[in-house]
Image (tube, rainbow, N blue to C red):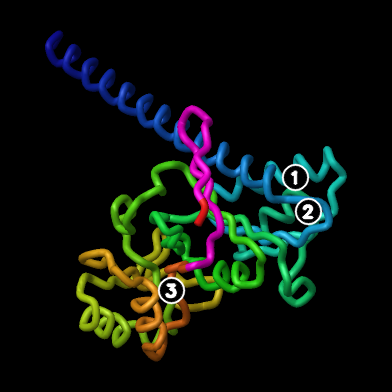
Amino acid sequence: MFTSVARAGRGLQFHVTAQIRQCVTMSAIEAGKKAAAFAAVDEHVKNNQNVGIGSGSTVVYAVQRLAERIQKENLNIICVPTSFQANQLIQEHKLNLGTLETCPKLDVVIDGADETDKNLTCIKGGGGCQTQEKIVASCAKELIIIADDRKDSQVLGTTYKKGIPIEVIPMSYKPVQLKIQELFGGEVVLRMAHQKAGPVVTDNGNFVLDWKFSKASEDWDKCNTAIKMIPGVVETGLFINMAKVAYFGTADGKVTKRSV
């Protein structure tokens, strides 16, 4: 009996220790995200600007910092969202909400990335917002990427293993899936939802395919163009020659800035 209790106690201790380690790791990651977001907002957002607000967990800190600066410095900023999430963040922080109809030209867009290579080519769309993110980014003078240092790679596919997101018209997902595999190899999977039966549905009412490529392309631009020419493809999560600078935050709050 004593042995069983002792073993149970050791098991509980191991479980608690593992949870603590996980919390410490997550806190370190969040510290990196926050540091990168704050640095980007402080260096690139100025008064009387139209600012694109990206999507994802790191952008939450950017909006937080932007709201702080607007209140403290009395800035006049119009914020254009890239997704439903970004729209909600803007409204929750009581910022001026704009659209591409009212603000078709933006000064800067601050957005996250799933991975960024040495040329600042990015994989985006882990949250399924790549189409609207790319549209908004294309309207800006500068696209600024913010992320923790896990997202900083020399070659795409080094750290992000979920593949390149590709938004497709629902009826086309199977032929697009097969054509990408025929052209480039690897595996293309339909992204399935959690806590919902069936596939993920984007803000645009489409499906997302994740292309888990077998090796990195030497010419992502050519690869991206070929995929977009397949009927049914709406947009890819490859952002090529769009980002001007990227900020990568570390667990101790330091930030590395990289530009092209």
Q: Note whether residue 176 is visible.
A: yes
Judge whether residue 75 is colored magenta: no
The residue shown at (80%, 55%) is 77
Q: Residue 114 is drawn in which quadrant?
A: bottom left
Judge whether residue 245 is colored magenta: yes
In the displayed image of the protein, which residue is found farthest to the front? 260
Give amino acid for label 1: Ala
Q: Residue 67 is drawn in which quadrant?
A: top right
Residue 203 or residue 115, whichever sits in front: 115
Q: Which mark lies nearer to you, 3 or 2? A: 3
Q: Note whether residue 57 is visible.
A: no
Q: Main secondary structure of the magenta part?
A: strand
**Mark 1 highlights which residue?**
67
Give amino acid for label 3: Thr
Q: Is residue 31 above or below residue 213?
A: above
Residue 170 percent across, percent down from the top left: 41, 83
Name the element at disc 1: helix
Q: Are marks 1 and 2 in contact (CB under 8 Å)?
A: yes
Residue 217 percent across, percent down from the top left: 28, 69
**Mark 3 highlights which residue?**
236
Name the side, left or right, on which 104 lies relative to 247: right
Quadrant containing the N terminus is top left
State the CA–CA distance, disc 1 to disc 3.
31 Å
How many residues crowd around disc 1 within 10 Å: few (fewer than 14), some, or many (20 or more)?
some
- Whichever of labels 1 and 3 marks the residue nearer the N terminus, that label is 1
The residue shown at (52%, 37%) is 255
Q: Which residues are magenta?
A: 241-258
**Mark 2 highlights which residue?**
95
Give amino acid for label 2: Leu
Q: Are marks 3 and 2 in contact (CB under 8 Å)?
A: no
Residue 221 percent across, percent down from the top left: 39, 75
The residue shown at (39%, 54%) is 118
